[in-house]
Image (cartoon, rainbow, N blue to C red):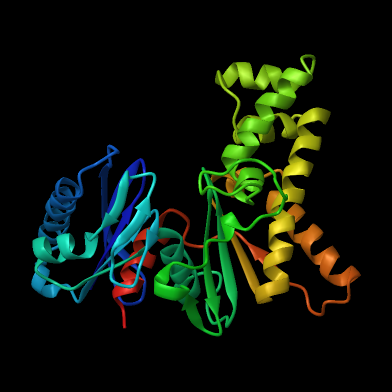
Amino acid sequence: MFIGVDIGGTNTKVGIVSKLGRVIAIDSFKTKVPRDAVDLVEEIYTVTQKLLKANEMTLENVEGIGVGVPGIVNDNGNVVLSVNLGWKDLDFSTIMKKRFEKDVVIGNDANCAMLSEWRFGGAKDSKNAILITLGTGIGSGIILDGKLFRGTNGMGGECGHMVIVHNGEQCNCGNKGCWEQYASAKSLARRTEIVAKQNPSSKLNDVIASYKKASAHTCFEAAKMGDKVAKELVDEYVDYVVCGLINLTQIFRPEIFIIGGGVAKEGYGFIKLIDTKLNNFITKNNMGAGIQVKRPVLENNAGIVGAACLAMK
């Protein structure tokens, strides 16, 4: 059995995972960021022991522990930067190992999600696959020639920060025009608020008022109701998403794109729209076989299962 820990900006999940990727037991708690790392590890330890005891196990039964962190993690398990957690240059691996007295593998959360889909989900048996999560930012995990691509010292694969608009919107990474400034859920929420104010008579404003704030969800909700302004906004957003996928297609040529994050659950034919626009481009430009575009199979358990995958040999 393995322990998988998925640390998020809102919640931290802990799970017991079998070597076949089955989640045997799961529990969670509020992360409460910014959070002292030692204090967080202590709570992870407490929850882990509680789960093990409830399932008549001890740490001796655990073959390995993996932890997914939202941020840049190097080969030594150090968190170079996690904006969501307020961590910088933190030797998180040593803190975990000291408390658990076992080997612990630390990795980026999006890489964990990709591993889970590659070993047990929608990208199983593929040689080249890319997972993209559309959330506050854009997370990404890349399987290249049957291996997880991490780049030099584990700091590569940050697809959300490739530039798609020269001198475009300012990004928190310090650059301008990054993909996540146009294709993240946060960017869609920002555009929704701006466009709604420009079109006061649209149904989009009514939907925003009912939820008391503009968000990616309100845009999709209004589009489902047939609002022309919202539909045009969704179409624009899909174009930005596909723009980045085309770039990744040209560089990596994956067999499969897994599109996750809250936006991917919105419906309105979102995944189908992406699939159609991406593969129309591939066909039009004689770029060979099409690429599958899918939602994650493991959904909410992807982070836990993927973290456990880090510890599986």
Position of 157 with respect to 79 (left or right) is right
Position of 149 with respect to 308 (left or right) is right
Position of 238 with respect to 190 (left or right) is right
- The residue closer to the viewer here, 4 or 132, is 132
181 is higher (above) or lower (below) than 3: above
Residue placed at 17% from the left, 65% from the top?
94
Residue placed at 66% from the left, 48% from the top?
177
Residue placed at 60% from the left, 25% from the top?
214
- Residue 229, x across and y down, in percent: 80, 29
Residue placed at 39% from the left, 66% from the top?
306
- Residue 217, x across and y down, in percent: 61, 34
Quarter of the C terminus within the rendering = bottom left
Position of 191 with respect to 211 (left or right) is right
- The residue closer to the viewer here, 236 or 55, is 236
198 is higher (above) or lower (below) than 232: above
- Residue 310, x across and y down, in percent: 33, 72
- Residue 238, x across and y down, in percent: 73, 48
